[in-house]
Image (spheres, grey):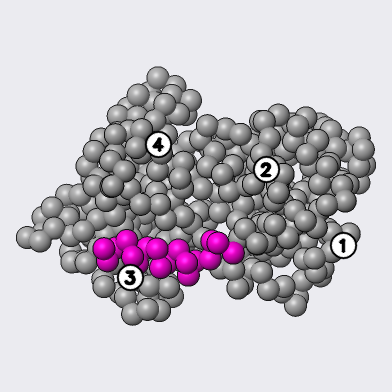
Amino acid sequence: MKIAFVYDAVYPWVKGGAEKRIYELGRRLVCEGDEVHLFGVKWWKGENVIENEGMVLHGVCKARDLYNGDKRSIREALVFAVSLYPHLKSESFDLIDVSVFPYFSCFTVKAVSGLRKTKTPVRYTWHEVWDDYWYDYMGRAGFFGKVVERVVSKIADNNIAVSKLTEKRLEDLGVPETDVCVIPNGIDISSIAEPDKRAEFTPHDPEKKRYDIVFAGRLIREKNVDMLIRAASLLKRDIPDIRCCIIGEGPRKEELTDLAFRLDLSDNVEFTDFLDYGSLIEKLRVSKIFILPSSREGFGISVIEAHACGLPVITVKAEYNASQYLVSDGIDGFVVKPDEKEMAEKTKKLLIGDNYRNFSDAARKKAENYDWDIVLRQFRENITS
């Protein structure tokens, strides 16, 4: 098959769950003999069209900021959608998979698909459904985001949801159950679960871990990393040498580093920029607990990566947080109220309790269900049905 993926952000130049999903599925499809094209913003230098791991990457417009402050740039999304049209129209495909957010490119894909004598099949991949959350995100202007999202849900007749939560929210928008298939994100179990011989510590001995707590993600408001830092401050009362590593970049980084300083955590909290994938996994392996205090996650691939490294995960109960459904409360982690006191309490229970190994083993077993090869089979079944 000749398959096109459409998303403005492209891995590895932009790192996130949606980008990683396309990259992992794309390169595996290539290995099985498919021809894979990816249409996105041109994040790389040189030619507009390049090859990367067997995939053909089309840079449809020059690189520009994805975010305006801590919010997705509407201008960038519009420029990408308009620029996409002539590039996508110039070739024929057996299937187009478009990541729905940030929406406008869905209309471009729909238009290009409809131009063919035989309509090109399209899959609309939904990582999240916001609905009323648009008002939290944009205030009254969120009305327009909500309308656009609902319009896309009406034009999309073959939908892929990355989580059960997203599937439910699509059905709440009126999308028929028969028009939605759940295909989760995944991880490469073989490369994560097998200990790296270069790692300084083994992943199985909690007494030899470098960090007690680790977080990885974009430093934006919805991630609530300030809650994690405040929980670390509470934990320091009982565990003076507690160590926390915060991995990521974003508009709130300076504010968060200032908060850690004001709470006298400069020696306890380490900030590091985004890491390449291998380095990220090594950081997880030398940590004890992964905390994701995010109030909004379409899936939460970092939870599964942490599980595969044997880390129990603590996340929060929040209406738009799909990652809470990846954690079995009290078995491979905890799902807590969005409150630093409860977060600190559960973290302490894991750090000084005597059943950490049980949590760790359960986490590793959970991750086995999310191998990319399993996800690929589900994707293949969907696109050939």
The single residue placed furthest to the left in the displayed view is 117
Q: Secondary structure at mark 3?
A: strand
Tell me the distance, in whole angstroms, between the alpha carbons under discs 4 and 3: 30 Å
Rendered residue at 84%/59% (across/down): 206
Image disc number at residue 169: 4
Q: Are the residues flagged by discs 3 and 2 in contact, CB closer than 8 Å? A: no
Q: Quadrant of the C terminus?
A: bottom left
**Residue with the mark numbered 2:** 329
Q: Residues within 10 Å of mark 2 (few under 14, many from 20)?
A: some
In the rendered view, does 344 fall on the left or right side of 97?
A: right
- Where disc 1 sits, the SS reads helix
Task: Say what amino acid the circle numbered 3 marks.
Answer: Val
Q: Which of disc 2 and disc 4 is earlier in sequence?
A: 4
Residue 154 versus residue 84 in the image, above or below: above
Q: In the image, which residues are magenta?
A: 368-385
Q: Which mark is residue 338?
A: none
Residue at (64% x, 46% y) in the render = 328
